[in-house]
């Protein structure tokens, strides 16, 4: 495929959701961004609701990813999700943000569940580390 | 730590401002991992003794490295902060600085190595601008690559390590078959990695510099193209694959098979086929020669005394000894230099009869060699996990020996 040179859209000004994320990184130990297309997103939410977590966690999600109950969360629009994912594709801007999004370009800890190396619970616990 | 980063670490320590701080202040290092241990070794060799290694992992508190304790970062707050300096070689520099700031630390912090160009743990405007420019360069570079290899699928190997390439190629064929891909290009950093690819496959190989590879990968990720794969355990991003090691020891080969490629653990690795005969065998006595491999760019070197013992032992037994060298590497005392290409190593070792090497990617290339094979493991933990290198890289069918301070070759 011959692709034309694609000009990147200008992302100099941070969107409001990125600013919000930056502020939340001051408060929370870990932030999970759950794209509703991601496998395991709803399983993870269900598990997290029951798990006694000693860390301060917040979830950023769109409505379809699951019922978060009392978990600290921010309900995003799809545009806001796209804004975060776009930043994430530009660089890894925090090691305290874990993005659950469909991606087939590199490996993923969730592969260990599919291949029987770890259980789903073990993977979720590892992600909180 | 590879040579490039080690040199960067040396330069940083040698900077006048840093030297002044090291002389005048109490030194702490942040993040207990192999790279930090190498920093500690360097500081000790210069006469500077860190007070402690700071680490968030409670399981490591109370552990010592060369008499230096691993403690919680909060311990720093008991110190006179005006007279302390925290040195960081770990990749999470910005996150660590952020943590220190949140603790209330106001002392000096020094970034010693820029370890991973994909990660900048900051959303400051200048960082965003810089990383955007980097991704933009990557988009252009990736488009150029696509024009060169039209309609190809790209396997982008982000790290220049022979072992990583070996494991990648051991499972890549299965992965590509699963995805029904038959036209592909393997992109690597450095010619040596290209030679490892060619042991397995005659596919096109594109050799890039580290910087170009990083940018191509970022550009491709940004574009969300579906014709790439990045086969690595901790690139492009810190990738949560690594976190699995906090729960369980997963050998590196299995990380590639299952974590990276998503293949079943019972999938058999592809065995390399394209070796060639080493012809300059003058001086190699069949079955009575030892090939030594003491050098590896991404592994802490063993002490000279270890190799001296080994050389002395086999000299007394009448063996001929060679040191495998590249570039300006010097053969061990009492041995001669030998410079086979990667594809020729297997035939050389099989003729020689014996190989003893520091555990490195070169050992993976020789996995199937029919000879007396020994891998020596420096005594360190894999990254920031509790697993030893021997747990992660053990080679089946070889003698795998951990070299501790009291190592005596004869007893092994």
Image (spheres, rainbow, N blue to C red):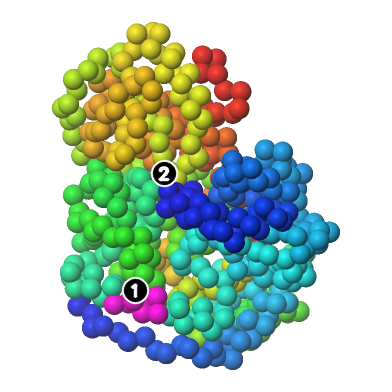
Q: Which residue is drawn at 60% across and 59% down?
A: B18
Mark identifier at residue B2: none
Query: How many numbered discs, if any?
Result: 2
User: In screen coordinates, is B398 left or right of A35?
Assistant: left
- In the rendered image of this protein, does residue B24 appear above or below residue B279? below
Q: Which residue is drawn at 60% across and 69% down?
A: B94
* Residue B71 percent coordinates (x, y): 75, 51
Label placed on residue B297: 2
Which is in the foreground here, disc 2 or disc 1?
Answer: 2
Task: Tell me, yes or no, whether dots 2 and 1 are on the same chain.
Answer: yes
In the rendered structure, does residue B396 fall within the stretch colored magenta? Answer: no
Q: Residue furthest left?
A: B279
Q: Where is residue B308 in the image (x, y as percent from the top left)?
A: 46, 21
Q: What stretch is highlighted in magenta?
A: B133-140
Residue at 63% across, 67% down:
B95
Tell me the distance, in whole angstroms, between the alpha carbons under discs 2 and 1: 27 Å
State whether residue B182 is above or below residue A10. above
Which quadrant would residue B82 be assigned to in this image? bottom right
Residue B124, percent from left and from top: 57, 81
Q: Which of marks 2 and 1 is nearer the N terminus?
A: 1
Instruction: Say above or below: B32 vs B331.
Output: below
What is the chain letter for disc 1? B
Tell me the quarter of the picture where residue B122 sits: bottom right
Q: Which of B388 and B119 is in front in this view?
A: B119
Classify mark 2: helix, strand or loop. Answer: loop
**The stretch drawn in magenta includes residue B137:** yes
Q: Residue B138 carries which label?
A: 1
Question: Visible in this render: residue A7?
Answer: yes
Q: How crowded is mark 2: few (under 14 residues within 10 Å), some or many (20 or more)?
A: some
| Circle 2 chain | B
User: What residue is shown at x 45% (from left), y 60% (from top)?
Assistant: B235
């Amino acid at each position: 495929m011959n692709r034309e040179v694609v000009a990147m859209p200008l992302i100099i000004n941070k969107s409001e959701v990125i600013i919000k994320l930056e502020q939340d990184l001051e408060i929370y130990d870990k932030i999970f961004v759950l794209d509703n297309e991601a496998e395991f997103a709803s399983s993870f939410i269900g598990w997290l609701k029951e798990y006694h977590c000693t860390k301060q966690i917040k979830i950023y999600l769109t409505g379809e990813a699951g019922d978060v109950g009392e978990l600290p969360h921010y309900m995003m629009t799809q545009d806001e999700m796209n804004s975060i994912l776009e930043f994430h594709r530009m660089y890894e801007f925090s090691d305290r943000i874990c993005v659950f999004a469909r991606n087939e370009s590199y490996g993923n800890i969730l592969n260990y569940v599919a291949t029987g190396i770890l259980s789903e619970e073990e993977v979720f616990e590892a992600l909180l580390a | 730590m590879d040579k490039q980063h080690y040199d960067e670490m040396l330069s940083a320590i040698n900077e006048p401002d840093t030297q002044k701080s090291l002389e005048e202040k109490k030194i702490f290092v942040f993040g207990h991992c192999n790279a930090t241990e190498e920093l500690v070794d360097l500081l000790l060799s210069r006469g500077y003794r860190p007070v402690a290694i700071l680490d968030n992992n409670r399981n490591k508190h109370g552990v010592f490295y060369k008499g230096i304790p691993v403690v919680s970062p909060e311990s720093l707050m008991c110190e006179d902060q005006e007279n302390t300096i925290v040195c960081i070689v770990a990749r999470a520099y910005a996150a660590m600085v952020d943590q220190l700031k949140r603790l209330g630390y106001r002392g000096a912090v020094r970034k010693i190595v820029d370890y991973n160009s994909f990660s900048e743990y900051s959303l400051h405007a200048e960082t965003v601008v810089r990383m955007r420019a980097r991704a933009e360069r990557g988009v252009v570079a990736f488009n150029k690559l696509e024009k060169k290899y039209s309609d190809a699928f790209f396997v982008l190997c982000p790290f220049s390590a022979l072992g990583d390439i070996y494991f990648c190629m051991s499972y890549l064929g299965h992965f590509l078959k699963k995805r029904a891909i038959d036209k592909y290009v393997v992109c690597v950093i450095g010619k040596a990695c290209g030679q490892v690819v060619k042991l397995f496959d005659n596919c096109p190989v594109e050799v890039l510099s580290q910087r170009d590879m990083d940018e191509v990968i970022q550009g491709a990720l940004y574009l969300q193209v579906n014709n790439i794969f990045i086969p690595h355990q901790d690139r492009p991003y810190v990738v949560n694959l690594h976190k699995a090691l906090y729960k369980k020891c997963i050998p590196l080969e299995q990380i590639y098979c299952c974590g990276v490629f998503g293949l079943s653990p019972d999938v058999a690795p592809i065995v390399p086929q394209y070796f060639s005969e080493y012809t300059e065998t003058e001086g190699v006595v069949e079955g009575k020669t030892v090939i030594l491999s003491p050098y590896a760019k991404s592994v802490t070197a063993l002490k000279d005394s270890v190799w001296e013992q080994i050389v002395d032992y086999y000299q007394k037994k009448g063996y001929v000894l060679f040191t495998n060298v590249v570039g300006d590497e010097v053969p061990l005392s009492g041995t001669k230099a030998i410079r086979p290409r990667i594809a020729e190593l297997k035939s050389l070792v099989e003729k020689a009869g014996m190989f003893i090497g520091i555990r490195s990617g070169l050992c993976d290339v020789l996995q199937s060699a029919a000879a007396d094979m020994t891998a020596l493991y420096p005594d360190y933990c894999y990254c920031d996990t509790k697993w030893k290198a021997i747990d992660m890289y053990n080679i089946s069918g070889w003698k795998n020996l951990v070299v501790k301070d009291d190592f005596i070759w004869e007893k092994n």
